[in-house]
Amino acid sequence: MATATTTETKAAPATAAFNYYTLPTSPELDDVTVVMGTSPAVVSCQVPVVDLRGTALSDFTHESHGFQVLRQPLPIDASHASVHDTSTMANEYYPAMVALLKQQLGVRCAVVINSTLRDIPGHDASTIDPKNPRPTTGTRSLGPFFVAHSDYTPGAARAHLRAMTPDWFDATGTGDGSTTPEDRALFLRLRSEIIAAEDRAAGLGTDRGGEAEGKGGHWAWDGRGYEGPRYAMFSIWRPWETVRRDPLAVLVGGDGCAAGDAFPYVALPRVYRSRPGCVPEYYNENALVRPPTADTPHVWGYLGAQAPDEVLALKFYDSEALRRGDGSVRGMCPHSAFHTPDMDDEPTRRSCELRVWCVW
């Protein structure tokens, strides 16, 4: 099923329109108009964009840049029917991606959290459940995401880990056939070690008042002093076909992408409910990237004609980045799709992203 990488790309545009949340304060709770780009607080800015193929792709690492290009032939048939079949994804695609992460990132444990399929030009905000952000229409298809963001703030990533329940694998359909008993036991043991180590480092006791609203507890902790297993959350992003329209871009330069994770962002508060394998309700946050200014310019980069064997690992959280706290390890990778007029007649992008826990 291998698909050869193609580098027959159009000339990269000098600039492209990227959408940013512009208010200095956080949006209202669960304001999905922000993530849909329909809020008046979301404004389009013309920003420099470069094709990363002008650079050795191996120079980009998740340690230094927050993202990394991994190589793997397509492990499954990429037809619409195949990728929309939950059994094929859970029992064939997920294990292949876990094997890729173990091989190329050197992790000892990787667990798929969920998957998102983007294979339509766009979608209606009214069809998305704000408490469990998935379509309510019976389809799994979503359109590209056109707002500059990193999926979660640091506290929000930790909240996702803490919200998982002991029956998580069965509840998410990732038990037998998708994972081995040994892998499941290892992850659940490491998760317990991670949470215990965080609580010790943060000096947390039994009084955890405020955590349910994103205040106090681990939400107020900066990640320093952590001595547990290193762990991270990634999006593993792959196109099912060569990308000709609405490519995914990452923030690669400019003063707005300063050392470490110093780019300004605003938290979009969320409350998630009824997510499979999680507690009934928990507070969370999405990170909305602030727009560039004269003092903090942005430069975005993308892979021209990204092929199915080119897999992007985008980091949302890294305990090591917070533990060091000196910018030497990147913990987040701002990203967004973008569109230019010359893409109007190109085929709709078909892609998949997996959110994955990785533990070293």
Image (cartoon, rainbow, N blue to C red):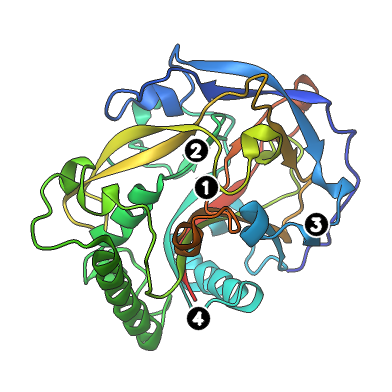
Q: Looking at the image, is mark 2 or mark 1 earlier in the sequence?
A: 1
Q: Vertical placement of 359 versus 299: above or below?
A: below
Q: Which residue position is annotated with label 3? A: 57
Say which of marks 3 and 2 sits in front.
3
Is residue 129 in view?
no
| Residue situated in front as seen by the camera: 152 or 318 | 318
Q: Pointers 4 and 1 in contact (CB under 8 A)? A: no
Inter-mark Cα distance, 2 to 4: 32 Å
Above/below status of 136 relative to 101: above
Residue 63 on image: x %, y %: 62, 61
Q: Which residue is mark 4?
A: 108
Task: Decide which of tag 3 and tag 4 comes sooner along the chain.
Answer: 3
How far apart are labels 2 and 1 at the CA level?
Answer: 6 Å
> Reading the chain from its start, which is encountered first: label 2 or label 4?
4
> For residue 304, what is the image quadrant?
top right
| Mark in the foreground, 4 or 1 | 4
Disc 1 residue type (three-letter): Leu
Circle 1 sits on which residue? 117
Q: Nearer the viewer, residue 262 or 169?
A: 262
Distance from label 1 to label 3 (Cα)? 25 Å
Spatial CA span between label 3 and label 2: 28 Å
**Which of pointers 1 and 3 lies earlier in the amino acid sequence?**
3
Which kind of residue does numbered mark 2 sit on? Leu
Q: For label 3, count other residues whose C-alpha is less than 10 Å away and answer few (under 14), some (14-19) or many (20+).
A: few
Looking at the image, is mark 4 or mark 1 earlier in the sequence?
4
Mark 4: amino acid: Arg
Q: Quadrant of residue 60?
A: bottom right
Disc 3 or 2, which lies upstream in sequence? Answer: 3
